[in-house]
Amino acid sequence: MSAAFASTPFAMRAALEAAERAAARGEVPVGAALVGPDRRLLAVDGNRVEEHRDPTAHAEMLVVRAAAQRLGRPRLTDCDLYVTLEPCPMCAHALCLARVRRLYYGAEDPKGGGVDHGPRVLNSPSCHHRVEVYGLIAEEAAAALLRDFFRARR
Amino acid sequence: MSAAFASTPFAMRAALEAAERAAARGEVPVGAALVGPDRRLLAVDGNRVEEHRDPTAHAEMLVVRAAAQRLGRPRLTDCDLYVTLEPCPMCAHALCLARVRRLYYGAEDPKGGGVDHGPRVLNSPSCHHRVEVYGLIAEEAAAALLRDFFRARR
């Protein structure tokens, strides 16, 4: 982990740890954490596409679904998502549908991202809820996890 | 159902019937069917957002996940999706991630769609797989289901 890790928000630390566990399972190391209106962690998970044999089992989707289950409602009003990588278009629009308040992400994803790259779905007229976006939180630690994972596979 | 219903492809008929069942459950009436490489139905389901208390439980997501489970792999190569409404950006990108071959949809969704409206995510550089798209299949029947549902709620 980078030297900046100690000053990382607790929910992003939880997301980074979930990403490390994903890497240990052989999954692309992305982790996410959902924080409820009372600032407690509602759900933490990492990518499980291969384990679940589910193309939609990105970390963000898993924590959105788990948090909605836990709250007993399909809308995550006043909840914030922390994720180690810029969400893809699928996950970004799921945050819109779930009415998530704020998105904090780590590393940028110029090739696959859908928030500040590609279709920028949260700025599209198809997104009927405004999600506040804060990028590059603990970016170095998040990017290092991905770099190490792909380097080891080459 | 419209007079054109008899000539509707069998998978779209299955999707329309799933949409009708969704309406009967009080869900927005959208249905989807996934057809495997052998042209058999792999999965059929309707929207279950309220029932599952899951903002991601759109018909398309449910059949993509069920089909991947059934095939035992996260990629739906040579599979085709039929859905009664133009997919939203979340579902559209899920089809890209799942490597679905063809998308056939019913009614257009100018306000919430993400394929031929809004962010058009399947034409974005973030989508690294080409999904063939065929819109307006059994459009009238699909649109009538939605119209009747929202009229009854007013």
Image (cartoon, coloured by chain):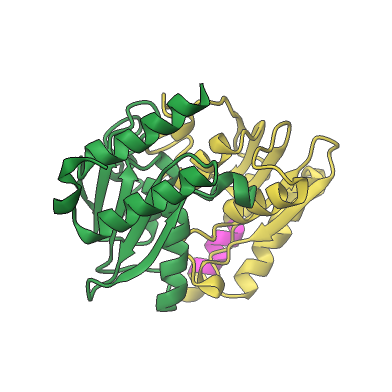
Chain colours: A yellow, B green
Q: From the viewer's perspective, is A27 left or right of A46?
A: left
Query: On the image, which quarter does residue A40 sit in?
Result: top right
Q: Position of residue A123 (x, y in %)?
A: 46, 26
Q: From the viewer's perspective, is B130 left or right of A99?
A: left
Magenta stretch: give its range: A144-150
Q: Position of residue A135 (x, y in %)?
A: 59, 36
Q: Quadrant of the C terminus of chain A?
A: bottom left
* Residue B82 visible in rendering: yes
What residue is drawn where x is 68% and y is 38%?
A76
Taken as a whole, is the magenta stretch helix, strand or loop?
A: helix
Q: Quadrant of the N terminus of chain A?
A: bottom right
Q: Position of residue B90 (x, y in %)?
A: 45, 44
Question: Is residue B3 magenta-colored?
Answer: no
Query: On the image, which quarter does residue A133 sit in?
Result: top right
What residue is drawn where x is 46% and y is 54%?
B61
Q: Position of residue A153 (x, y in %)?
A: 47, 75
